[in-house]
Amino acid sequence: MKLVIFGPPNAGKGTQSQKLSEKYKIPQVSTGDLLRKAVSDKTPLGLKVKSYLDQGRLGPDRLIVQIIKERIAKPDCKNGYILDGFPRTMAQAYELEKITQVDIVLNIVLDFNALLERAVGRRVCPKDGMVYHIEYNPPTKLAGACDKCGNELIQRDDDREETVRERLRVYKEQTEPLIEYYKQKCKLVDIDGAGGIDSVFKQMIVAIENIGKVA
Ligand code: AP5
């Protein structure tokens, strides 16, 4: 099964991808996580993309496609994967189509104010990428620490309000056009992102179980 989790910044793509990965036992492939890891490890790739992430702009298509190709060629992807944050431009969508056919694109729909509120309250584990929210999804074991590994949670650099606004602008300009593209291919299902995490997850499960019946 090959899924694309689509939507604007902070819509809940990572949160839902982690839950789907657990349920279907296929890996979450997040370009954002891969790029942040490269930046924190100061690899040559990380040095190249750091300024893009800091400014909320998209990294170069050629580089991003290469990262995806290498990641999905790994053995853990042989039964499928969940693409989180890819594709994000028409050029990336065309490249993806050359590599594989995805089964479904789950498009999380949420308004601007809710996206901003989710960004401001988001906390992440720098070690394993687990995502929390100070109000909507706080850690359950120890305040401010990852439930999985106990590491101290941090705020992402690009969750500052002006960077979030820039990421949303970039989304509207470069990523939103993909909605029409996947609609025309009858692959896209809208998911109401305004409900709680479990309610969004349930909608996704229903959509996945109806793959092939999408009109
Ligand atoms: P990336 O990491 O992909 O960022 P993004 O798309 O902006 O998405 P986010 O990770 O910010 O949000 P999300 O939708 O995953 O929401 P989350 O689950 O965390 O990319 C970062 C950067 O990398 C880009 O700006 C770009 O520079 C670069 N990049 C990445 N991919 C690229 C590509 N393909 N091409 C070029 N460049 C690329 O949830 C947000 C918060 O809300 C959390 O606190 C969560 O707990 C909470 N929450 C989630 N769901 C709910 C809910 N239902 N109710 C209440 N709270 C909720």
Image (cartoon, helix red, strand yellow):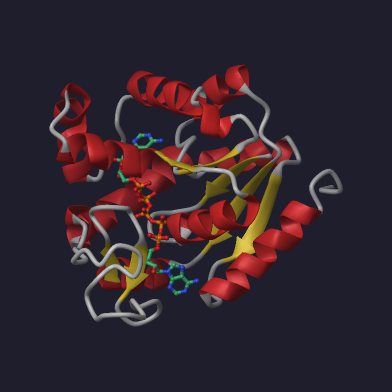
Hey, which quadrant is residue 115 in on the image?
bottom left
Compared with residue 23, is residue 60 higher up or lower down, i.e. above or below? Answer: above
Quadrant in which the N terminus is drawn: top right
Q: Position of residue 68 (x, y in %)?
A: 44, 27
| Residue 33 visible in rendering | yes
- Please tell me which residue is depicted at 51% across the width and 53% down the height of the picture: 17
Q: Position of residue 178 (x, y in %)?
A: 55, 38
- Please tell me which residue is depicted at 45% across the width and 32% down the height of the picture: 89
Hey, which quadrant is residue 39 in on the image?
top left
- Please tell me which residue is depicted at 21% across the width and 57% down the height of the picture: 156
Q: Position of residue 179 (x, y in %)?
A: 59, 44
Q: Position of residue 186 (x, y in %)?
A: 76, 41
Q: Quadrant of ligand 1?
A: bottom left
Relative placement, left or right, of 81 versus 166 is right
Depth check: give the residue in front, 146 or 6: 146
Compared with residue 51, is residue 56 higher up or lower down, i.e. above or below? Answer: below
Depth check: give the residue in front, 5 or 215: 5
Relative placement, left or right, of 19 versus 39 is right
- Please tell me which residue is depicted at 72% across the width and 37% down the height of the picture: 184
Q: Count how many numbered circles sit on residues in the image.
A: 0
Depth check: give the residue in front, 178 or 59: 59
Relative placement, left or right, of 154 versus 170 is left
| Residue 57 visible in rendering | no
